[in-house]
């Protein structure tokens, strides 16, 4: 386990990745959070799961940020 902090991702974030999807779009919507991140291509609508570490390496920029309140509402309660 590395000592680097986890990047803050929220449901509804739109991110730009390093390489374009085969449809030509390079923007993705974050629709699932966890160890694997669910992404939906903004060009063709295709859904993909990617490991959080791989996403952090491939991420170039945030196009728009989602709402932290929505992400907190669906997150499991920690005890």
Image (tube, grey):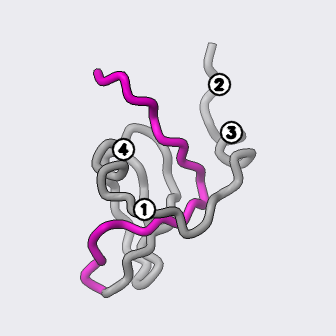
The residue beneath circle 3 is 72
Q: Are marks 2 and 3 in contact (CB under 8 Å)?
A: no
- 22 left or right of 55 in image: left
Q: Residues within 10 Å of mark 4 (few under 14, many from 20)?
A: some
Q: Position of residue 30 (x, y in %)?
A: 50, 59
Q: Are marks 4 and 1 in contact (CB under 8 Å)?
A: no
Q: Circle 4 sits in a helix, a strand or a loop, which is it?
A: helix
| Magenta residues, start to end | 1-23
Using the image, determine if residue 35 lies above or below residue 38.
Answer: above
Q: Circle 2 sits in a helix, a strand or a loop, which is it?
A: loop
Give the mark, 1 or 3, whose residue is nearer the N terminus: 1
Give the mark, 4 or 3, whose residue is nearer the N terminus: 4
- 42 left or right of 10 in image: left
Q: Position of residue 12 (x, y in %)?
A: 60, 60
Q: Position of residue 19 (x, y in %)?
A: 27, 72
Q: Circle 1 sits in a helix, a strand or a loop, which is it?
A: strand
Using the image, determine if residue 79 lies above or below residue 48.
Answer: above
Label ID, residue 52: 4
Q: Position of residue 54 (x, y in %)?
A: 28, 49
The residue beneath circle 2 is 77
Q: Circle 3 sits in a helix, a strand or a loop, which is it?
A: helix
Quadrant of residue 47 within the rendered picture? bottom left
Give the mark, 4 or 1, whose residue is nearer the N terminus: 1
Using the image, determine if residue 16 lies above or below residue 13.
Answer: below
């Amino acid at each position: 386990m590395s000592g680097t902090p986890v990047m803050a991702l929220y449901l509804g974030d739109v991110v730009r990745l390093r390489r374009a999807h085969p449809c030509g779009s390079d923007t993705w919507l974050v629709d699932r959070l966890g160890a694997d991140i669910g992404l939906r291509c903004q060009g063709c609508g295709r859904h993909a799961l990617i490991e959080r570490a791989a996403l952090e390496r491939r991420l170039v920029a945030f196009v728009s940020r989602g709402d932290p309140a929505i992400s907190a509402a669906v997150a499991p309660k920690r005890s």
